[in-house]
Image (spheres, rainbow, N blue to C red):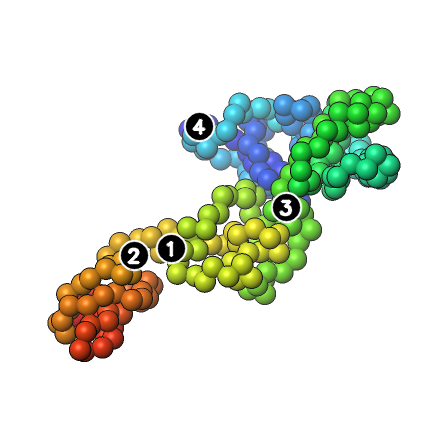
Amino acid sequence: MIEAVGVSFKNGGKVYYFSPGNYKLKEGITVIVETGQGMQFGKVIEANKNISPNALKGELRQVIRIATKNDYKKHLKNLEEAKEALIKCKSMVEKSNLNIQIIDAVYTFDKSQLTFRFISDNRVDFRDLVKELASIYRTRIELRQVGVRDRAKEMGGYGLCGQKLCCSRFLNDLDTVSINMAKNQNISLNPTKINGICGRLLCCLKYEDETYSCCKKNLPKIGSTVKTESGEGKVISLNILKQKYKVDIPEVGIIEVSLNEGN
């Protein structure tokens, strides 16, 4: 096991793990950390804890120090300058007729890199834009394409359930969701029922998928032929959570069989 702390660089953002060194860090403390892009200002989301090396996706970088008042002032200044850069970049994109939507701009704490995130449905050649931005801001420029799910996470809103979007409340990592999960749960494949406001499959389809898979193990497949006390027939529907299924038996009709009742 390795001692680490979880740090996020924005409210509701993804949590990254860093080595705390000799620091004992509580949740809510702001820190300066070393990243692959440069120094970053972040907030501790998960205090010191031991984690498995398998949970790490790369090298565990260091917490450099607990942030000072001057660090915080510099961070606020970086945020303001990033907003100005965002406005400038959007104007340049519009003039160049590039088919991309710039959604935000972020400086690293040491201003060694300025990252612009964007959404685009097509492949776009933005090399000239990068060169022009680099000449203006005199730092390394990165344009990073993100998906519509990431955009929904930042914008927020309410889902079909009436609750605030999971992605903007507590989901730090947006896991892959497949249409097979909806099929596994016998949910109608109507896009208006299984898609979120981002236009992609609902993240919550993944929450109960494992439970449904476990419950279906003892149930027959729809279309299969089974023997019951009333005779042999074809399975026409399943009630997975109640562990029941309906069987159409010739000359008898449709009956419901419950695994829990043993009939």
Q: Residue at x 74, y 39 (%)?
A: 100
Q: Are marks 3 and 4 in contact (CB under 8 Å)?
A: no
- Residue 53: mark: 4
Are the two marked residues, 4 and 1, in contact with CB atoms closer than 8 angstroms?
A: no
Given the image, on which type of amino acid does mark 4 rest? Pro
Per the image, label 3 sits on a secondary structure element best described as helix
Q: Secondary structure at mark 4?
A: helix
Residue 148 image label = 3
Callout 2 touching callout 1 (CB < 8 Å) = yes
- What residue appears at the point 26 percent right and 54 percent down from the top-left corner? 217
Q: Tell me the residue that label 1 is attached to.
A: 184
* Amino acid type of the residue tagged 1 in the rendering: Asn
Numbered disc in front, either 2 or 4? 2
From the top left corner, tell me how far across and down residue 201 is, in percent.
53, 52
Labels 2 and 4 touching (C-beta < 8 A): no
The front one of 56 and 208 is 208
Identify the element where label 1 is drawn.
helix
Q: Give the x, y percent position of residue 175.
A: 50, 43
SS class of the residue under badge 2? helix
Q: Earlier in the sequence, mark 2 or mark 3?
A: 3
Say which quarter of the image contains residue 132.
top right
Q: Is residue 136 visible?
A: yes
State the image quarter where residue 110 is shown.
top right
Residue topped by disc 2: 216
